[in-house]
Structure formats: C-alpha cells, structure tokens
Image: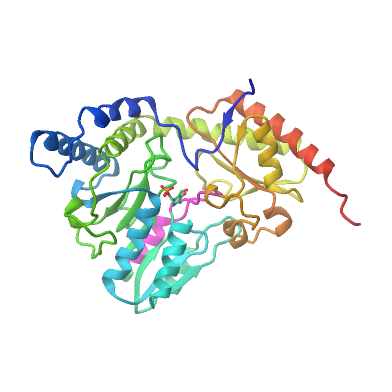
Amino acid sequence: MTRRVYLDHNASTPVHPEVVAAMLPYFSEIYGNPSSVHGFGRDARSAVDAARERVAGFLRVRADELVFTSGGTESDNFGLKGLALARGRGHVITSTIEHHAVLRSAQALEAQGFAVTYLPVDQYGMVDPDAVRRALRPDTIAISIMHANSEVGTVQPVRAIGAIAREAGVPFHVDAVQTFGKVDIDVDAMGIDALSFSSHKVYGPKGIAGLYIRRGTKMVSIQHGGEHERRRRAGTENVPGIVGLGAAVEVRARDMKAEAERVSALRDRMWEGIRARVPDVRLNGHPTERLPGTANLSYRNVESESIVLGLDLKGIAVSAGSACTAGSVEPSHVLVAMGVPLDWAMGAVRSSLGRSTTADDVDYVVASVAEVVAKVRKAMPVPAA
Ligand SMILES: Cc1ncc(COP(=O)(O)O)c(C=O)c1O
C-alpha cells in the first residue's frame, strides 16, 4: 500500500480521538433540543452551556460574548456584515489577502452602498498598520483584517491594528480561523471587537464554529428565526458539534504550545531539505511571522497542479493555493497581492503540517518533491532562449 502523508491541515484536520469520544453520546443518547423545557432538552442545554464556558475560558472572554455558527465562513459573514449593517452605511477597511468569506462579504456590502478600502500587502503578505491609519475616514465603521493567512501563513500585526482601531473608535473584526488553537489570542490586548474562529482546523468537527462579539458592540444578526444564541443567531444548536468544539479547545489548551514548537521545527526541516535538493524554489510568506505548520513554496516555471497530482500519486496531500479555490487555474489572489511574479505564483504549493506529522514523513516528502519536480520539469518544453 502506498504510504499516506497528510500535509493539508490548513484545509481541515482529523477529529481528535478525545473529541470523538466526547461527542458520541450527543448523537443518540442526549439528543433533545436545547430549547425544550423537558429533561431531554435540559441535558442538551447543559452540554451546550458547558462547552460555551470552555471556549470562553480558552479565549479569556465571557461566555455570553460567544455565538456558535456553522463554520468560519458564516462567522466571517456575520462579523463583517453584522458590524456594517448595524451602522447602516459608511466605509469599511479590509485587505486584499483576506479569505473569500471576508472578501465576498465586503463586495456584497459594496453592492449595498457601503464603501470598501482593500489594503495592499508587502512582499511577505503583511498589512502595514500605518496603511490602516491612513485609510481611516470620518465615516469608517468597521475594520476587518485576518490574523493569519491560510495560504502563506503570514501572521498579521493585529495588536498594532487593534490599537489604531481603538484610538479611532472603529470596531475591529479579526478572522482568526487559521490561528485559533494554534497561536495565542488575547482579544483585549489586541483590541479585537469581533473574532471568527472555527473548529475543523484544530481537530474538532466540521460544521461548527463561532464568533466572539465584545460586550456592548453594536451588531445585527444575519440569520433570522427563533430566539437561539440570545437572539443573535437563529437555528437549533448543533449540540454534538458544540460539545466537540468544547472538547477540542481543551485539547488545544493542553497541547498547543508544544505542538507549535514541534511542527515549526518540522516545517523548517522540510523547507531546508527541499531548498537543498530542488533548484529554483522560493518560500512565500513571512520568514518568521508565520503559522507554525505552514510552508508555501513556489517552484519556478512549474504548474502547481502537476506537483500536487504527482505528490498525490505518492500518497502525499498538499494543496495548490487555498483549498477553496483549488481547481481554478488562476494564480492565488494572495500571491498576486504579494507581488509574486507569475512564473513563480503559478507553481505555488502549500504544505500545512499537523499533530500527526513526523520527521520521517518530512524526509519522505522532501525526497518525493525532489523527484516529482525534476520529472515535471524534464517533461516540460524547453523555454525559448
Ligand atoms: C482564514 C480563513 N477564514 C475563513 C475560512 C472558512 O472557514 P470554514 O471552512 O470553516 O467555513 C477559512 C477556511 O479555510 C480560512 O482559512
């Protein structure tokens, strides 16, 4: 059987066995609707409340500042549209390298008459806090900047941006889907008023995520119906999912720090190994301010899809650009925004390591990448002199 190595943890992760165990009773034993007043309902309600306390403790926020949602995408829609629509009209600041959940929400707001500034980034994919300051207008009503980019892993200076937002009195939304449970987040020190986070990137189940909303922040709901989540998000709660998210944060609180160190070392070992064996390769993203497990490498004049498919034949899972846009032949909007030249941008391959990755896996990947890239390059037509 072919060996299998999963290096696509930024796309999704396997559910941790402790999380699976915590969730199981909530499918068939404790199945009541948390809104029901009877005992079955009350049991489900207690589980939801306990999980909410756990997540709140992990984020060092109040339990009533959390709203559970169906995913990072919903949280981003809720965070950005919720802040903007609560203010009726005005100007929003975001960046060109946001996830499409934020970018397309911003575009939807533009279609409704809001003005949006999309800030550029530098060659490392970093937003300049001074650019945020310069973009402020008297009618600016929201700032939304991601914590870390999913494709290249660059961690943004959110603390400095949060300080500017605070000073200006503008609410600050942060898409922390890629940092939640991987990097420390302090919403007070970072001046964050709304924070999107998701469960399936950190060994929790899919279909459950959340939005932190600082107490007192004016925000409207985008999903209407019953009185759930203190009338902020209608719909029967995903009880097993919420329990799973609660269990996942417990595991993260315990394992996060050591895992980040281990995974960063493996990521660097992989980059060093590939750099030593493959010509014409570069690292995209910030050299140090980067997610622990993320390495986005470009192979010049090679199509990334050929490498992804070649590695897939060897049982290795990596991604060409972000998982959400894979299949499209356009270079990634993130690499374009960073000014990565086209002959490099088209050959970008993201590896995202995780808790199960071993040094042995990394060595297998290095050898396989060297082989696949050499083969693809050999098969390519020789460029005209
Ligand atoms: C930065 C970022 N924001 C939002 C999302 C969307 O999250 P979800 O897949 O939970 O909808 C992702 C997923 O890749 C992401 O990386």
Screen quadrant of the C terminus: bottom right
- Out of 57 and 384, give the one closest to the viewer: 384
Give the magenta range. 147-165
Q: Residue at position x 67%, y 54% from top?
A: 345
Quarter-of-image position of residue 239? top left
- Is residue 17 positioned above or below 108 on the image? above
Q: Residue at position x 80%, y 43% from top?
A: 377
Q: Residue at position x 41%, y 42% from top?
A: 183
Quarter-of-image position of residue 125? bottom right
Left or right: where 182 falls relative to 380 = left
- Locate residue 185, reporting x and y percent: 36, 46
Considering every residue shown, the one lying at the far right of the view is 385
Residue 171 visible at all: no
Considering every residue shown, the one lying at the far left of the view is 38
Left or right: where 277 falls relative to 245 = right
- Locate residue 77, reporting x and y percent: 37, 59
- Out of 267 and 327, give the one closest to the viewer: 327
- Per the image, is 32 magenta? no
- Is residue 300 positioned above or below 267 on the image? below
Quarter-of-image position of residue 206? top left
- Out of 298 and 134, give the one closest to the viewer: 298
Residue 331 visible at all: yes
